[in-house]
Amino acid sequence: MHHPMKQLPERAISEDEAREILDLGEYCVVATTDEDGHPYCTPLSYVMDGDTLYIHTGAAGGQKTEDWARDPRVCVTVAMDMQPSYFQTANNPGFFTTGYASVIATGAAHRVEDVATIRRVLANLCLKYSPEFKREIGGAIQRELSVTAVWAIELDHISGKAGRRVRNGKGAVSHPAEADKADAGQK
């Protein structure tokens, strides 16, 4: 079930903008459900490839992989450009807010078995987080391949929103209409 944005729908962004945030985001938080029905959230490094979000884990697994074995459904959150701010405008003596861009996506996780895909994903993860070590990536993957697992989360729903003053220099979204509303004293 997908929940429509209920508060401040003017902050909703397009699916293309949400995908851009997924592509540019640094880390994600993946939520699973444990054996007792409780939520379990894990911050993770990730890389996108189309509608698939890839992560890696130790081959032995852990809580999240045990959860996926029972129920592969997940919720993923990416937030970026967090900018706490204090604003004063002509019509408003001042207020605190936070600029941001965020995405919530849902999907199902499964372990990747194809070795070529595993190598490609691990290389892309290394390039995303440590591009300065490009020459060492192949050797590192070879050494760690037997103790590393790659997981694919096939995203089936993506939505996002952004608050005012969101700008990261890479094309992230902003909603100047919110500043205009604040100036006019609207909520």
Image (spheres, rainbow, N blue to C red):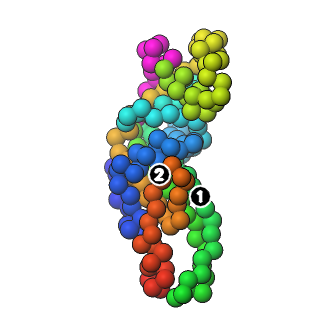
* Image: 26 above or below 162: above
Query: Which residue matches tag 1?
Result: 82
Would residue 132 be visible to someone looking at this image?
Answer: yes
Q: Amino acid at mark 1?
A: Met
Task: Tell me where residue 104 appears, x and y as whole percent.
Answer: 44, 50
Residue at figure coordinates x 49%, y 27% from the top left: 151
SS of the residue at dot 1? Answer: strand
Local packing at callout 2 (Cα closer than 10 Å; few below 14, some 14-19, many 20+) is few
* Image: 130 above or below 114: below
Depth order, front residue of 51/156: 51
* Image: 18 above or below 138: below
Q: In the image, 12: left or right of 170? A: left
Would residue 69 be visible to someone looking at this image?
Answer: no
SS of the residue at dot 2? Answer: loop
Q: Which mark, by number, is residue 171?
A: 2
**Closer to the N terminus: mark 1 or mark 2?**
1
Local packing at callout 1 (Cα closer than 10 Å; few below 14, some 14-19, many 20+) is some
Residue at figure coordinates x 58%, y 36% from the top left: 45
Residue at figure coordinates x 41%, y 50% from the top left: 18
* Image: 133 above or below 7: above
In three-dimensional space, the C-alpha distance between marks 1 and 2, rounded to whole angstroms, equals: 15 Å
Give the magenta range.
108-119
Task: Tell me where residue 21 appears, x and y as whole percent.
Answer: 47, 48
Q: Amino acid at mark 2?
A: Gly
